[in-house]
Image (cartoon, grey):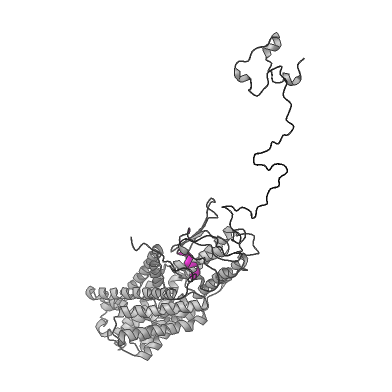
Amino acid sequence: MRSDRQQTPRAVSAAETDTGEQQKPLSDEAHSAFTPPLGIPLPPPPEDEHPTSEFAVPDGLTAEAPTEPEGSAFVPPAGVRTPSNNQTTGGFPVITPPNGVPIVRLTKDAPWQDRMRTMLRMPISERPTPERVERQDETGPAVPRVLDLTLRIAELLLAGGEGAEDVEAAMLGVAHAYGLDRCEPTVTFTLLSVSYQPSLVDDPVTASRTVRRRGTDYTRLSAVFRLVDDITSRDDFTLEEAYRRLAEIRRNRHPYPGWALTVAGGGLAGAASMLVGGDWPVFFAAALGAMLGDRLAWLASGRGLPEFYQFVAAAMPPAAIGVALSLANSGLQASAVITGGLFALIPGRALVAGVQDGLTGYYITAAARLLEVGYLIVGIVCGVLTVLYGGLQLDAKLNPEAALRHVERPYVQILAAMLLALTFCILLQQERHTVLFATLNGGVAWVVYGALADTAEVPPVAATTVAAGLVGLFGQLLSRYRYASALPYVTAAIGPLLPGSATYFGLLALAQGNLDRGIPHLTQAAALALAIAIGVNLGGEAARLFLKMPGADTDPSGRRAAKRTRGF
């Protein structure tokens, strides 16, 4: 009798059931090489189901305990900081930077602009991970909120006139402070974007923001700089506190009312008229023209006209008052009145920012800023030329040769330069504690320019470059001392150096149809404007070059430049 186990492998077909006879399988595939043939009993199962290995220790022997555990090529040594454990107990860095690049320590031993600029000028593959303290109250970085906070801070900085490199440095600093190491910010004239990639295998997260409105409020700009400094230097500064501070900054009103800005514009124009040889009656005439132009520009702004037409409207009243004085044969210098009005309108802040962006490698932003400056200057030209052409049709005695005489009044001009810088500070809505330093910086700029141009007979372009370089140097030193932006200490101080007289003489020659005389004056005005911007940037770079940088003790190469191609 066959057992059940022996009958199990055999297949019974339907034909065999009906006829009672067994059919052969169709092929050899019906049998298995590991199945015993029919009639042969199965072998008994082995007693031990767990065979030994040739690498197992025989019975009776004890394995020798290892002296130290084996390491892995993918496990960091002891004391190395990992993303999950941000504390470093040993002396090993997270990565070994190529070419001896030091780890950037985010401590308050240098302004955050320099700390972040050191990393910003490296490719993202060569950036070291910054040393920072883990925030204990947060389980991990909320990536969308961090990116949103970064973009909102950058929007205020860019709208306030800050350079593109410092805006990117602020974005990088905020992102690193909240744990987003692999972050890449991008700044253009109106578009801000930031991209974060958690790892090489994860999808990047990108956010962007458009800057639609730009204004001049250096008080708000300084507050944003302090906010970035607190975020990058304090380990207990949470996202909620950062958002609260940012909301307070946006809600704060301007420190000076509208009427104070109008009076400051008049004082700036009057001080500028005295710099080019005017006296007290010319001072008041220029101040009146500038205040009328300011109110007219406010009216155009309230009607929703673009900024170009606002500059056209603001340039007409000073020119009209100068033409009226010339028609009345008052004996006053009409050219000084018109020149003072031009001083109050020349966009020196945007010009310096545009040239600075170009010198640091942000060519798209620089081109957009300089194009904006060009449009605003064209607006000024249209307003002044319209009035000058009408005055010439009325036989106004506007003789540029009589106005070219240079009067040396050192004490009066130094006081006028300081007054010009003071009123410029009010127009820029600066904090009150920065007004004194900016005013003194403007006085120093005019003293240096007068000493070089009048005493040493240095060409005006070279003298302007040296004076603007000192303004940039002192402004950078003051900003480092106060951990603030350098713009409040620099922008107002370059006011006395602006090319107002050269611009006026060029426009007057064009209105008279004298291109041979007008084009050289306008070319000189453009050269002076570029000299101011380059000098300010050179002074700031000199301060960063000779002062101690983060990592200077270990990195012999120093701070890397933005570009290393040398044009090739």
Tell me if I can see residue 454 in this picture: yes
Q: Position of residue 332 (x, y in %)?
A: 32, 88
Q: Position of residue 236 (x, y in %)?
A: 63, 68
- Range covered by the magenta-colored residues: 113-129
Q: Position of residue 382 (x, y in %)?
A: 33, 71
Which of the 4 image quarters holds residue 451?
Answer: bottom left
**Image quarter in which the N terminus is found:** top right
Q: Answer above or below: position of 415 versus 560.
A: below
Which residue is at a point 34% across and 79% down the rendered structure image? 464
How many numbered circles does the render carry? 0
Q: Is residue 125 magenta?
A: yes
**Image quarter in which the C terminus is found:** bottom left
Left or right of 217 on screen, residue 332: left
Left or right of 220 on screen, residue 354: left
Residue nearer the viewer, 81 or 124: 81
Residue nearer the viewer, 522 or 552: 552
Tell me if I can see residue 213 in this picture: no
Q: Is residue 444 magenta?
A: no
Which of the 4 image quarters holds residue 505?
Answer: bottom left
Outermost residue toward the front? 60
Which residue is at a point 46% across and 78% down the rendered structure image? 477
Residue nearer the viewer, 210 or 402: 210
Q: Position of residue 511 (x, y in %)?
A: 27, 75
